[in-house]
Amino acid sequence: MPKVEFGSDGIRGIAGEWPFTSLSLVHIGQALGQFVCSRFEHPFVVVGRDTRPSGEDLLPCLIAGLTGQGIDVIDLGVMTTPGVAFVARRQQANLGVIVSASHNPLEYNGIKVVGPNGLRLQREEEIEIESLTDGYPARAVECAATPGQQVDGQHLIEFYIQDHVARCPAKSLENLRLVLDCADGAASRVAPEVFHRLGAQVLSINDDVKGKNINYRCGSEYTQQHPENLVDTVRQHCADYGFAFDGDGDRLIVVDGDGRVYDGSDLLFVLATYFHSKGLLRNNTVITTSLANRGLIETLDRAGIRTVLAGKGDRNLEAAMWGGDYLLGSEPGGNVIINDGNHTAADAVYAALVLSGVIVSNWPSSLAALTAWLQRRPQVTVTRKLPVVPTLEEAMQEEIRRWQRELGDSSRVLYWRSATEPGAFRVMVEGNRESTPEQVSQLSEAICQALQAIAEQAGETVDR
């Protein structure tokens, strides 16, 4: 049996396949129980899930593994990943565990784990949990003499909603007309209620908590690539903006009625300049990742705001922010972290709320006006499916290096395998100041075709 391994954003896989079978989830729950029992007396854990139908079957198995180790479990049911982190921190739980595959398609599922502080576990802690799953299912795990109790904690979601509402003056958003695309995911549970209570005129779409179409042609990931559906809805209902969340509510992409798309880099720029103008941006510094647009970094620098680059992924962004006690960080994909003392995770609902407050405070100015002097470079990220073939990585990396040498330092080409979507690789191409979006798109396609040819040739070699 392969080893259970944490990737950059938890454990991921296909529901119904190892390790996302009922028995495997019991074993993982047992490992988490052993891990937390080794550190705390009388531990308890907060759990939740996104709306995937598979999660409805898998979460009880995870809970059974935990309670079998004597762990008391507070079950929030359907809840966003940042919502579970918030409740776990508020209730001083020893762990928060979320069964979710975030922005991935319906057939996937995953497990995310946060510690008592609401932050992701350190890598050495994940390695310890991985080691505790070794030998399953052949190795039996001794159960606790007294099983833990499972408690319904859905009433605690109200604390999360009240916290968000309290961040804005009562009815402060009453002139704002919004379309909320909840991706048929966990944000459906909380986002519409938060904005309704603050007086916003809200149209909620793709908000089925049964999750049978989670992330399918909706939500932040789809909107970033295909914004026309949400843009059309914004226009039809004369809304000001459309906010698109992902399946577990940690990503945010925004559109307006003119067809503009605002990703994590745009949102970082707007929030950074706002906080900077109010004297709230600690150390006049923001955190983003290596995928951030160079134009963003250059424009922030001219505004007197320093940018620190972390590695790709929430874990690296989060670690850099808390390591330096910075207020604001974001990835281009829409993961926005606002470290204001109450929120530890990338929280799309909270980011949307704060952004709405910025918009209202600058009324009648618009996001288009607030981002007008952000001079972005043309940038395209393309995803392709490729088989994992021995010796393939080195050849593909050399091809990327060849393209980079040809383009020179004024442009960038990055390549990486997805940590959350098996078999997928991504290529990011960023042009120089003179490049057009069309040129960058054509270049990214040419590079992908070259990599595809290398993969096919490597596959033929292996078949022989």
Image: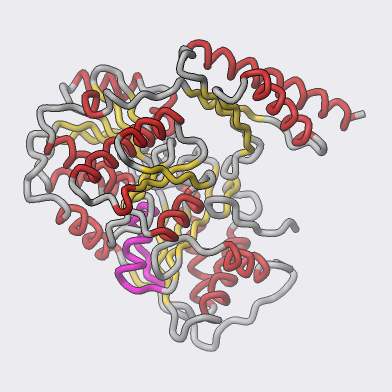
Query: Which is more toward the observer, 346 or 145?
Result: 346
Q: Identify the residue at horizontal 31%, vertical 25% (top origin).
A: 230
Image quadrant holding the C terminus, namely top right
The quarter of the picture where residue 214 lies is: top left
124 relative to 385, above or below: below
The answer to whether residue 393 is left or right of residue 151 is right
- Is 3 colored magenta in this rendering? no
Image quadrant holding the N terminus, namely bottom right
Give x and y (percent) for residue 95.
44, 69
Q: Identify the residue at horizontal 52%, vertical 39% (top origin).
A: 290
The answer to whether residue 20 is left or right of residue 50 is right
Give x and y (percent) for residue 218.
38, 31
Query: Which is more toward the observer, 414 or 392?
Result: 414
Give x and y (percent) for residue 68.
53, 77
457 relative to 194, above or below: above
The answer to whether residue 65 is left or right of residue 307 is right
Question: Furthest-bottom residue in view?
Answer: 145
The quarter of the picture where residue 376 lies is: top left
Query: Which is more toward the observer, 174 or 289?
Result: 289
Q: Identify the residue at horizontal 68%, vertical 68% (top origin).
A: 131
Q: Identify the residue at horizontal 59%, vertical 64% (top origin).
A: 126
- Is 81 colored magenta in this rendering? yes
The total of numbered circles placed on residues is 0
Instruction: Residue 326: tell me if it is visible.
Output: yes
What coloring was used for the rendering? secondary structure
Q: Which residues are magenta?
A: 73-93
Instruction: Residue 56: tell me if it is visible.
Output: no
